[in-house]
Image (cartoon, helix red, strand yellow):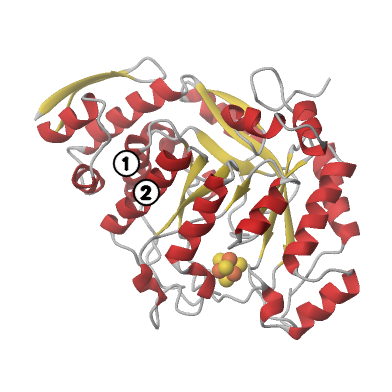
Amino acid sequence: MYDFVVVNADQTTYTERQLPVSYADELRSGMPLSRDGACQLIRCGEDELPAVLAAAMEARQRFKPGITTYSRKVFIPLTNLCRDYCGYCIFRRDPGQTGAHTMTPDQVLKGVRAGERMGCTEALFSLGDKPELVFPEMRETLRRLGYKSTLHYLEAMCELVLRETTLLPHPNPGLLSAEWIARLAKVSPSMGLMLETTNASLLVAGAAHDNAPDKIPAKRVYTIEEAGRQNVPFTTGLLIGIGETLEDRVDTLLAIRELHRRYGHIQEVIIQNFRAKPEIPMHDQPEPTQGEMMRTIAVARLLMPDVNIQAPPNLSAPFYDELLDAGLNDWGGISPVTPDFINPEKPWPHLEQLKLRTEAKGYRLRQRLPVYPEFVPAVTTEPGLLSEKVKAAVDCDGYARRPA
Ligand code: SF4
């Protein structure tokens, strides 16, 4: 066993915490944490947890001391039609189902303008994956709107937002080809795709992804890899509690770490916890505990000490601020305008509350853009509309410029 002395952000000191000596040495040596080490740490007992958290905090403090970020966003659910049927999803609809909806360009602009008035800097486009491949109704909607596919429509709406407003689009459209990554990268400074899990056995009958062809892990890795080849700042992450094991969580983190090692483009890793709802097929699946969240975040931080680690505060309310003790440094997108359409029963914390609770843990809360400060140069070197808009939105430290 090994003793740690770690100074926390609020100047409290973790002392006499203990980790198994081999993993403590691994962490102190500066060598990347191994799979075995990560699997041990994610399984740590209550007695070892304080030392694991202390080690994660030490890494977090080296990375971005004193600051926790969030992105003030407006949520644009461009279409909730989707060809997949994930067992935990409350967002998706079939055509004709109550609540099925595809936004018009006017509705997109109206929503974004509402966000603009509230100081938002991100337009988060969330949508189902390729609904037109299975639904003639979506093909008809797209024909009326004048687009060949959902991705053509998304591209046009990102361009509209970029041209007409001060917000920056961040699309989350599902799997993308190399060509589509290149096209969307011209109209958005960053994009995202949750890897969720590398466990392909969740595709079998009765599991979370048994009717979700776009959740094949290898295909998702391909999209993230292609974004890396094209140097696109990319957000990804884990969805925990959907039937995967603790080792699967480690393997998913390792897959992301390897992609980042090769391409250096992973700007953010989200640790999202499954939340059960009566309306979903997985309504009786147990939710991950706060302890699981803390351990997963801490191991993510230790595996990727130089990557932003995020968890949505509304999914860990009311004790979300505890997640800061595990090495988190970002709260993700928070909207003062729109609900969380993915977890509508979980309201986002009021921004003033988020600020107070973040400050109580010893951090200054700063508003970032959808593209993180360290990735701003990647999207501002080429001249053009995107570069101009990012430069207009960013301050000299790479965060969101405060209104004059
Ligand atoms: S989680 Fe995404 S891909 Fe899965 S059903 Fe919902 S909208 Fe479709």
Percent position of residue 70, x then y: 60, 35
Label 2 CB less than 8 angstroms from ligand 1? no
Foreground: 298 or 324? Answer: 298
Residue at mark 1 to residue at mark 2: CA–CA distance: 9 Å
- Specify the amino acid type for callout 2: Leu
Query: Which percent across, then down, holds residue 375?
Result: 59, 32
Q: Which residue is pictured at 77% across the width and 78% down the height?
A: 138
Could you tell which of marks 1 and 2 lies nearer the N-terminus? 2
Image side of residue 68 versus residue 251, left or right:
right
Q: Secondary structure at mark 2?
A: helix
Q: Quadrant of the C terminus?
A: top right
Q: Quadrant of residue 387?
A: top right
Contact, mark 1 vs mark 2 (Cβ under 8 Å): yes
Left or right: 158, with 230 as reference point: right
**For the point 80% across and 27% down, which residue is it?**
392
Q: Of circles 1 and 2, which is in front? A: 2
Three-letter code for the amino acid on which mark 1 is drawn: Val
Image position, residue 268 (x, y; %): 51, 40
Residue bearing the label numbered 1: 299
Q: Residues within 10 Å of mark 2 (few under 14, many from 20)?
A: many
Residue 150 visible in the snapshot:
yes
What residue is rendered at 43% in x and 64% in y? 217
SS at mark 1? helix
> In which of the image's four quarters is ligand 1 placed?
bottom right
Q: Which mark is residue 253?
A: 2
Residue 208: image quadrant is bottom left
